[in-house]
Image (tube, helix red, strand yellow):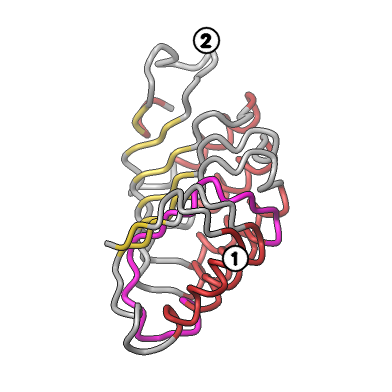
Amino acid sequence: MRSLHRNRLGAEGAAALAPALAANGGLAGLTELNIAVNWIKDEGITAICNAVQGNKESKLATLNVACSAISPVGATAVAAMVAVTGRLTSLDLSNNAGGITAEGIAAIADALRVNGALTSLDLSNNAGGITAEGITAIADALRVNGALTKLSLAWNELEKQGIKALCEALNQNLTLEELDLWPQPSWFRGGSSSSSSASDC
C-alpha cells in the first residue's frame, strides 16, 4: 500500500503522480493508494482517474480520495474511471462536503449501474452536496448493481424521500450487506444504531 495521506500534495502534486500510475512499471502494480486529505481538487483527481482508467495493466484495487475538495467535475472523472475499471473494489469519496452535488452523484450512480467489481463505496459526510435527489439516484443504481456489499451514506441529507428510495431498491438488491445511514432520524427503524444492515429497511 502506498499512503500519501495528508502530504499537502495539492492539485499539482497529484498531477505529477499521475504519470507513474499511467505507465507500465512505475506504480502500475500498486494495489492500494491513499491520497486523502490532500485537497487535490478537480485537476488532481481528474489526472489520477485518467491515469488509472487509461492503464489496462493497472492493479489498483483500493483508492482513498477523501477530503479532496472536489466538485461535480472531479466526481464525474471518478465515475468515468469506475465505469470501466474492473479491478477497483474499494473507493472512499467521503468528506467532500458541498462539493459532490446532485450532478456528481448522478454520475457516480450511472457508473454503479455498469460496474461489476466495486464492493465498498464511502460517500459519507458530503452534506450540502448529497441530498435526497442524489440518494435516489444511488438507490436506482442499487436496483441493478450486483457487486456492492458495503455502502456508507452517513452524515448526508438523506431525508425521508431518500431513505424510502433506498429501502425500495433493497427489495430488489440481493448483495448489499452493510448500509450506513448515521445519524438516522427517529422515525427510521433502528434509529438508535450507528449503522444499519440492509435488512433494517
**What amino acid is found at the position of numbered circle 1 in the picture?**
Gly
Residue 133 position, x and y percent, is 70, 40
Q: Nearer the viewer, residue 80 or 2?
A: 2
Q: Give the mark nearest the N terminus, 2 or 1.
A: 1
Residues 75 and 174: in front is 75
Say which quarter of the image contains residue 78: bottom right
* SS for dot 2: loop
Q: Is residue 95 left or right of residue 3?
A: right
- Secondary element type, mark 1: helix
Q: Which mark is residue 44?
A: 1
Q: Image point 37% across, 50% down: which residue?
A: 120
* Helix, strand or loop: magenta stretch: loop
Residue closest to the far bottom: 24
Up-down relation of residue 21 to residue 105 (above or below):
below
Query: Where residue 115 sits: x, y (%)?
Result: 45, 66
Q: Which residue is mark 2?
A: 186
Across and down, in percent, residue 88 comes to 37, 66
Seen from the viewer's position, the closer of residues 143 and 97 is: 97
Q: Residues within 10 Å of mark 1 (few under 14, many from 20)?
A: many
Specify whether residue 55 is painted magenta. Answer: yes
The range drawn in magenta is: 52-73
Q: Residue at x 54, y 67 (%)?
A: 14
Give the residue displayed 47% in from the left and 29% down from the top: 181
Task: Please determine whether, in this image, residue 101 is positioned above or below residue 145.
Answer: above
Amino acid type at mark 2: Ser
In the picture provided, is 102 more to the left or to the right than 149?
right
